[in-house]
Image (cartoon, rainbow, N blue to C red):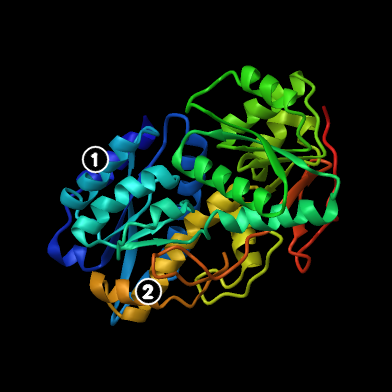
Amino acid sequence: MKFAVLAAVAALSVVTAAQAQEVLRIGAPLPVTGALAPEGAKLRQGYELWQEKVNAAGGVKAGDKRLKVELVYYDYQSATPKAVQLAEKLIADDKVDFLFSPFGSGATKAVSAVAEKNQIPLIASSASSAEVFDQGYKNLFGVYTDNSTFSEPLAELVKTKVPEVKRVAILARNDLYPLSLANEFEKSAKKRGFEVVFFEKYPIGTLDHSAALAQLRAAKPDWIIATGYINDLILVRKQAGDLRIGAKVLTLINGPAYKEWIEAVGPLAENVTTASWFHPAVNYQSEDVFGSSKAFVDAFKAKYGSEPDFTQASGAAVGVVLQSAIERAGSTDRAKVRAELQKGGFKTFFAPISFSPTGIADSYVPPVLQIQNGKVEVVLPESLASAPFNTGIRD
């Protein structure tokens, strides 16, 4: 309630023309409540760390002006149609200069149509599905690489390190990003000669996966892959444990990258693999307000008392990318900023960011992770690896 009131006050505040010249207003629909509330809270942390850092340094430099960053939030309650309505409100009523995306591929795809109609650059913090970026839009830019950059390295790792794996089972949330990701895993598995013996979708909001998991177990897979969000994958892992389902490899995306997922499932987290666009183990030197991956991680820990995961990092990443584009353009003119975004070449703490012609990032390879002894370890790429890859899961 407090969040909603503060957001409303921010949105309804009257700004004079002179003051408006000194403020950069960015609109951000967020899932503060509903099933995606954990992810929404993480994005907000990233946004606000970047905002705090920029404003402490005097603001975003746009030509001869310094603009303080003002973020305007609304809660879309994890409902995509409401995210669309609120994006329209942010543009029409709150007069925001730019937009940050809602969480996830489905809501981002829907809101990108609003941004395109209004010719407002939308920086997507958490969309990786090709289906989001195949619309021919010129105002959509996403800091995540596409889903195949998860499936391809993991499939190659399993093929190389666990040659006895032959049979693959896939359980996917029936939602744009998780289903797109599952389809990429199916393609990557078949490409390497694996047999996909089970592929099922579960509805959004499913609380009991036992029937699907029983069917999955009957298919006798060597490698189990499940896609969804934190709450989905907590349930999937716990219920698979209750049914004593074992496998040589268990891959869940994206839950295990989060500390709360590991804490929720306890010992069942051991040897679960996942992938992520960012991890504190990476250390890029950057030309943004943070200066390096390590400096970002240190700043996050100082503010929030824990290490950031990829969602929190991507919240800050969309900020530094937009800031860099504005400062290169020397202006908040949307056409000029859009042109700088299209040029890419941003050296950020998150990764080196450039965008394909469709707007999706195509300039880095995300790390593959595994939970070992309750900790997230990097197992790929080898240049970043903190531990060797393990096989077998607790059943």
* Quadrant of residue 245 within the rendered picture: top right
Q: Residue at 82% x, 27% y: name it.
A: 395
Residue 250 in view of the camera? yes
Against 78, is 149 above or below? below
Q: Nearer the viewer, residue 367 or 191?
A: 191
Dot 1 alpha-carbon crowd within 10 angstroms: few under 14, some 14 to 19, many 20 or more:
some
Against 149, is 346 above or below? below
Please provide percent x and percent y for residue 204.
47, 28
**Residue at the spot of label 2:** 342
**Residue at the spot of label 1:** 85
Left or right of 43 on screen, residue 372: right
Q: Residue at 84% x, 42% y: name it.
A: 373
Q: Nearer the viewer, residue 260 or 383?
A: 383
Is label 2 or label 1 in front? 2
Secondary structure beneath disc 1? helix
**Label 1 amino acid?**
Gln
**Label 2 amino acid?**
Gln
Badge number at residue 370? none
Q: Nearer the viewer, residue 233 or 290?
A: 233
Q: Residue at 26% x, 55% y: name it.
A: 115
Please provide percent x and percent y for residue 106.
40, 43
Secondary structure beneath disc 2? helix
Real-space CA distance between mark 2 and mark 1, rounded to the nearest whole angstrom: 27 Å
Q: Residue at 43% x, 62% y: name it.
A: 319
2 or 1: tag closer to the N-terminus? 1
Please provide percent x and percent y for residue 135.
32, 57
Please provide percent x and percent y for residue 107.
37, 43
